[in-house]
Image (tube, coloured by chain):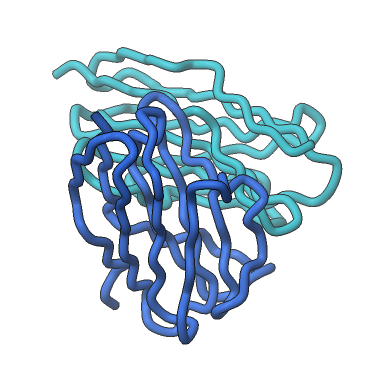
Amino acid sequence: AQSVSQHNHHVILSEAASLELGCNYSYGGTVNLFWYVQYPGQHLQLLLKYFSGDPLVKGIKGFEAEFIKSKFSFNLRKPSVQWSDTAEYFCAVKGTYKYIFGTGTRLKVLA
Amino acid sequence: EAGVAQSPRYKIIEKRQSVAFWCNPISGHATLYWYQQILGQGPKLLIQFQNNGVVDDSQLPKDRFSAERLKGVDSTLKIQPAKLEDSAVYLCASSSIQGIDYGYTFGSGTRLTVV
């Protein structure tokens, strides 16, 4: 069965700190991978996506993610976070045609 | 392009009452999805439409939830009767091509509180 795990439920960082949010999935076939962000009071927005090719994907606002097939992982990274990155981050995996979302990681960046 | 429109933004009802949500996807998007997002959890797919046909409704509690997409454009999701555990944000999303998916565009959601 298709599933997604996000290990960190809450992360607190100071501004300029580096960020890495974990995402692991289980699915036997070809997957498409996504990270979404939900800022307070706003709707879900696509940060970045991986379909094929270069496993290091760059998204908006300085975020990037690396697909490691052998580890079934798609971790989200940002070298230096800002206060405005405070939000909830969701990893999503698309198998045959269904999206599965992780439970989310709530990030708080302290100014 | 205009985004996915949803209404109402908020709804408070008593248990056993009925409620309906409306969604207007991005123009030209053939695929429409309804998700339920309970506080502290990720969105859970309830139903997926391709044009006006149902592709997947395996996680829709059909004894109380129903959805339709007439004419392959707007969609409504109904709950009748509502239970306390239905309190959640109901998200509508649309995408342009099924199978080659570039990520959904989500609406702002309807926050339902059942008391």
A8 or A15, nearer to the observer: A8
Above or below A73: residue B54: below
**Residue A71 found in image quarter:** top right
Q: Is residue A107 left or right of residue B50?
A: left
Above or below A37: residue A105: above
Looking at this view, name the residue that lies furthest to the right: A28
Q: Is residue B32 left or right of residue B107?
A: right
B28 or A105, nearer to the observer: B28
**Residue occupying image coordinates x 64% and y 32%:** A4
**Residue A97 found in image quarter:** bottom right
**Residue occupying image coordinates x 55% and y 80%:** B51
B18 or A53, nearer to the observer: B18
Q: Position of residue A76 (x, y in %)?
A: 50, 33
Chain A, hue in figure: cyan
**Residue occupying image coordinates x 39% and y 56%:** B78
Chain displayed in blue? B
